[in-house]
Image (cartoon, rainbow, N blue to C red):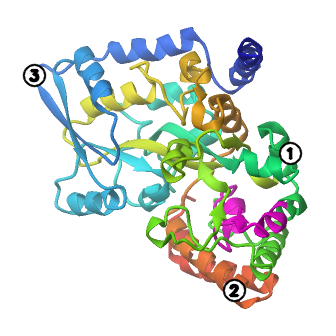
Amino acid sequence: MKVFRHLILLIFIFCFAVLTGCIGANSADAEGAGKLQSNEITEPNEDVEIKFWTYNDGWSTIIKGFESTHPKIKIKLEKFDFNQISSEYKKAISLGEGPDILLLDSAYFSEYTKEGYFEDLEGEPYLAGKYEDDFPRDVWESNRAINGDLIAMTILVSPIVTYYRYDVMRDNGFPAEPIEFGDFIENPENLLTVATKLKKNEQYIFQTPSDLMSLLGSTKGFFDADLNFIRNTEQFTDMLDVSKQTYKSELIFGRSIFEQEKQTDDGKELVMIFNMGSWGAGSIQEMMPGQGGKWRVTRPPLGVRAPASDTKLAINSQSKNKQWAWRFVEYIVTQQDGGENINMVSAYIPARKNMRVMLREDAFFGEQLIQPMFEELALEMRHYRHTPLDAEALQIFNRGVYEAIINDIDSEETMENIKNEAEERVKEYRRDLPK
């Protein structure tokens, strides 16, 4: 059976190679060309220290590999809490004490798309445009500021996936295998059927009343290029109606999986999570102890193909070591360390399809090969451009949606009110748009 599964995977990889060949220069020649240009740049004559701020671990091997290639460039790593790094960075910038390089998450990247925080990496001395064809078009464009500058480069992307209890779906007569279950939950009626039947056993698939609206929202931003609000559509109105139905029918678990301090012995059980990215495959195992082998991974409900998050690197405009900071950014983004990206997908197309990861079976997920699914979803999803008003628009959107669900406010009226409030907030930004 394992041989058969690996044969199927190899067929998938072959097809994947054909597809990615259409997206970018997915060839050894293209990858080598990028590295050759990098190596032709003169190294510093004396030791240079590059200050790098991050919110995660796992950098020691990468830094060691980089410093062995660039012995005069030393990387000084400083780690911050995820929820604090952005505010700490802004504070440091105001004092002229910021790092040379900052690791960014898409959750707060939009905050930097107007002000001149970061270097335009398509300009001198970076000339990052030589790598443009090695990235999916939408991923590349998602790194631009509102004025069009390329202010960051994406390292890894994380598609939204569905985690679900295989045994629960099987025992309740639903399709349980990943492919079949993914097909089944593309229909919103089937999703509600699952939720309704499982509720009888105090098992839930919706964490909060707004889960479905958040899922749909992941497929598009808030504003178009002219800063017109773009979520006031029939699709969002209809989904808001469905969300109100789930609330009225008491199909809601009532708390987020991340709210561990609110976990109680009320007998309720969460058996499906569909608003989390591929990055969460490891987190699920920590949050659901003793359930190894019972969970599986499949595509998101409703046919959604969207990113949950991505990680980016940017160079501080105040840096005094920009050229050498770029050496490190380039090294990471083009995956020159040859590492393995587990539960994430490289944004750099030539680094995808790492066989060691693609053939990695996960015992918690019943020995399922989950990386091929992540790679396939990464091909199908589309990133969107961020704007400086995204964070505020998200608050307006979430508040309006929640109030409509709880108080049963008309869906069309709600979406129109959200649109009007969001567009009122962007008036001043429209004046600064490139003409």
Q: Determine crowd level at label 1: few under 14, some 14-19, many 20+ residues with C-alpha closer than 10 A.
A: some
Cα–Cα span, label 3 and label 1: 63 Å
Q: Is residue 358 left or right of residue 231?
A: left
The residue closer to the viewer here, 292 or 218, is 292
Q: Amino acid at mark 2?
A: Ile
The location of residue 245, given as percent across then percent down, is: 81, 77
Label total for image = 3
The residue drawn where x is 59% and y is 31% is: 362
Where residue 325 appears, x then y in whole percent?
27, 33
For disc 1, the marked residue is 175
Q: Nearer the viewer, mark 1 or mark 2?
A: 1
Q: Find out whether the residues at labels 3 and 1 contact each other: C-beta distance under 8 Å.
A: no
Q: Earlier in the sequence, mark 3 or mark 1?
A: 3
Residue 435 pos. (x, y %): 57, 59
Q: Quadrant of the N terminus?
A: top right
Give the residue type that dot 1 points to.
Pro
In the picture of the structure, the residue carrying the numbered disc 3 is 46
Q: Which residue is mark 2?
A: 406
At horizontal 70% and vertical 32% (from top left) the residue drawn is 376
Magenta stretch? Answer: 194-221
Q: Residues within 10 Å of mark 3 (few under 14, many from 20)?
A: few
Residue 169 left/right relative to 33: right
Can you tell which of label 3 and label 2 is closer to the viewer? 2
Which of discs 3 and 1 lies nearer the camera? The answer is: 1
Q: Is residue 209 magenta?
A: yes
